[in-house]
Image (tube, helix red, strand yellow):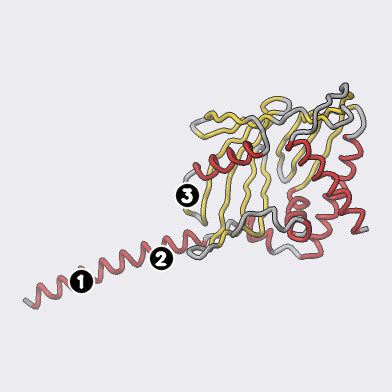
Amino acid sequence: MDHRKRAAAKLGIAIALLVGGMLGGVTWAYRHVPDFYRQSLAVDETKQREANDELLAQATALVSSARKQGTWSAAFTADQINGWLAVDVPENYPDVLASGISEPRLRIEPHRATIACHYTDEKVSTVVSLDVEVALAEPNVLALKIERLRAGAMPLPLSTVIDGLSTVAADMELPLRWTKSDGAPTALLSLPPMVDQNGTQYELRTLELRAGQLVLAGRTTAAGPTGHPPTPATAAFHALLNASALNLNVQR
């Protein structure tokens, strides 16, 4: 009898250790923080503000250049974008992030980017990260290959991203078509010809991700007056650029 009790006790301890190890592994996985994200959050505030000012200055130059007929281009570093996310977004666009999301940061590698942020609700607190391959399939057509979505180190269903992106595209009246590339869902997002009320047309011809850098290039042409109001996407584009220029002037 004692032998059976000892065997049962050993089995119980083994099960408890196994369950505890599994729970501990799950807890660790959810608490995992990507290295680049930890490093981005540790950047000194002074450097963040300097990077933010650099981005706003380049955005202002882009606005000026894009308003003239001909080609234009701009390059933004990951550090500059992260500075903008750390400084300008919380100070001037506090409502742009969904509830529970804070401190977004970005890593840029050749042809792909990783976006990470803190996510907190009453049940969980974790760092959510999204890996996406980015390219311009053709002028004004953005290709987004959704590779991975994680909470800590735990994989999450990609349907969350698919549904969210589809909703945003519908709200902004952007044509969106889903396909697959190497088995991964890929969004083909058609940016409408951006034509302002004066008939000036803006076309994005290059969007390239390099090591730590986002490169944009396009062309501005004078089209005839359309008589149509700008689309929501066009209005948002001009509002963002004009707000960036205004914020820089105010800071100066």
Horizontal side of 227 relative to 163 (left or right) equals right
User: Which residue was labeled with disc 2?
Assistant: 24
Residue at (54%, 28%) from the top-left corner?
Answer: 179
Q: Position of residue 34 (x, y in %)?
A: 58, 56
Residue at (77%, 47%) from the top-left corner?
Answer: 77
Pointer 1 or 3: first along the chain: 1
Q: Which mark is residue 10?
A: 1
Q: Which mark is residue 155?
A: 3
* Kind of residue sitting beneath label 3: Pro
Pointer 1 or 2: first along the chain: 1
Q: Nearer the viewer, mark 1 or mark 2?
A: 2
- 225, 223: nearer the viewer: 225
Residue 189 in which image quadrant = top right
Q: Which mark is residue 250?
A: none
Q: Secondary structure at mark 2?
A: helix
Q: Nearer the viewer, mark 3 or mark 2?
A: 3
* Kind of residue sitting beneath label 1: Lys
Pointer 3 or 2: first along the chain: 2
Q: Position of residue 47 (x, y in %)?
A: 80, 61
Q: Quadrant of the C terminus?
A: bottom right
Classify 10 Å Cα crowding around label 1: few (below 14), some (14-19), many (20 and above): few
Horizontal side of 215 relative to 141 (left or right) equals right
Horizontal side of 163 relative to 188 (left or right) equals left
Up/down of 238 relative to 29, above or below: above
- 42, 173: nearer the viewer: 173
Q: Residue furthest top?
A: 224
Classify 10 Å Cα crowding around label 3: few (below 14), some (14-19), many (20 and above): some
Q: Secondary structure at mark 1?
A: helix
Q: Residue furthest bottom?
A: 2
